[in-house]
Image: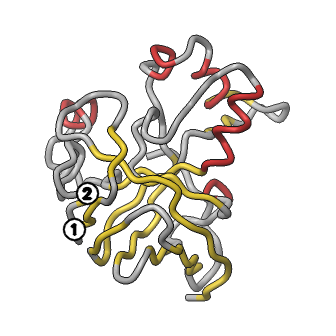
């Protein structure tokens, strides 16, 4: 594994119920092989309702959802006001191109926590409830016919720890070649 760049945590959020948006907090606690302590989507097996209906025993590859703050400014320019936690993310970052990282990338956050990226968020149409037309901005087809997903990345927790705004994030790339992130 190779350490490359760094960024920082802008905001953290969690919600104990299956609601679309999450409440920002002073800190969250990541638990290894589980997710965000007290969050409805935490667990070793899938917790998202649509995925539970399909395969309740499947591993939870969506324990922690991360989004880059830079996306919020881009969406604001397009008429969509988005704040940390509003799109259901647990950790809002700055200074890291999350969407450009390969699968298996590890993010060392703060003093102790480490997450590993599993894929791109595949959002549902509830996003339009936040702002009409936002879904088309976050998931669209490019000129080459490829689906572009901008709604953040999903990860699993390898090492637990407390995470708070202002914490540093170190990017550790996987060895053995880059595998692009796909929807999970």
Identity of the residue drawn at 82% across and 35% down: 144
Badge 1 crowding class, 10 Å Cα cut-off, few under 14, some 14 to 19, many 20 or more, is many
Task: Locate residue 77: give its quadrant.
Answer: top right
Residue drawn at 61 percent across, 69 percent down: 7
Residue shown at 42%/19% (left/top)?
126
Query: Residue 83: x percent and y percent?
Result: 52, 35
Give the image location of residue 162, x and y in percent: 30, 70
| Extreme residue toward the right, this view | 143
**Frontmost residue, 145 versus 181:** 181
Q: Height in image: 67 above or below 173?
A: above
State whether residue 64 is above or below residue 84.
below
| Element class at badge 1 | strand
Q: Residues within 10 Å of mark 2 (few under 14, many from 20)?
A: many
Query: Where does residue 111 sit, x and y in percent of width and height?
Result: 39, 83
Please give the label number shown on residue 36. 2
Residue depicted at 64% across the width and 21% down the height: 136
Measure how far apart labels 2 and 1 are at the Cα level.
Answer: 6 Å
Question: In this view, which residue lies farthest toward the front?
Answer: 26
Q: Relative to the observer, which residue lies in front, 89 or 24?
A: 24
Badge 2 or badge 1: first in the primary sequence? 1
Could you say whether the residue bearing mark 2 is in a helix, strand or loop? strand
Check the picture and name the quadrant holding the N terminus: bottom right
Q: Which mark is residue 31?
A: 1
| 5 relative to 129, above or below | below
- Residue 51 percent coordinates (x, y): 26, 36
Determine whether, in the image, residue 176 is placed left or right of residue 12.
right
């Amino acid at each position: 594994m190779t350490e490359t760049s760094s960024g920082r945590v802008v905001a953290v959020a969690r919600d104990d119920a299956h609601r679309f948006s999450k409440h920002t907090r002073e800190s969250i606690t990541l638990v290894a092989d589980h997710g965000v302590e007290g969050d409805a989507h935490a667990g070793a097996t899938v917790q998202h309702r649509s995925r539970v209906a399909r395969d309740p025993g499947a591993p939870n590859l969506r324990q922690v959802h991360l989004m880059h703050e830079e996306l919020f400014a881009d969406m604001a320019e397009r008429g969509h006001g988005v704040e940390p936690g509003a799109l259901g993310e647990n950790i809002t970052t700055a200074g890291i191109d999350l969407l450009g990282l390969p699968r298996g990338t590890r993010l060392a956050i703060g003093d102790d926590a480490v997450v590993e990226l599993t894929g791109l968020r595949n959002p549902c149409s509830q996003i339009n409830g936040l702002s009409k037309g936002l879904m088309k901005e976050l998931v669209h087809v490019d000129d080459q016919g490829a689906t572009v997903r901008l709604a953040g990345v999903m990860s699993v927790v390898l090492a637990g720890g407390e995470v708070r705004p202002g914490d540093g994030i170190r990017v550790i790339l996987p060895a053995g070649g880059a595998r692009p992130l796909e929807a999970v």
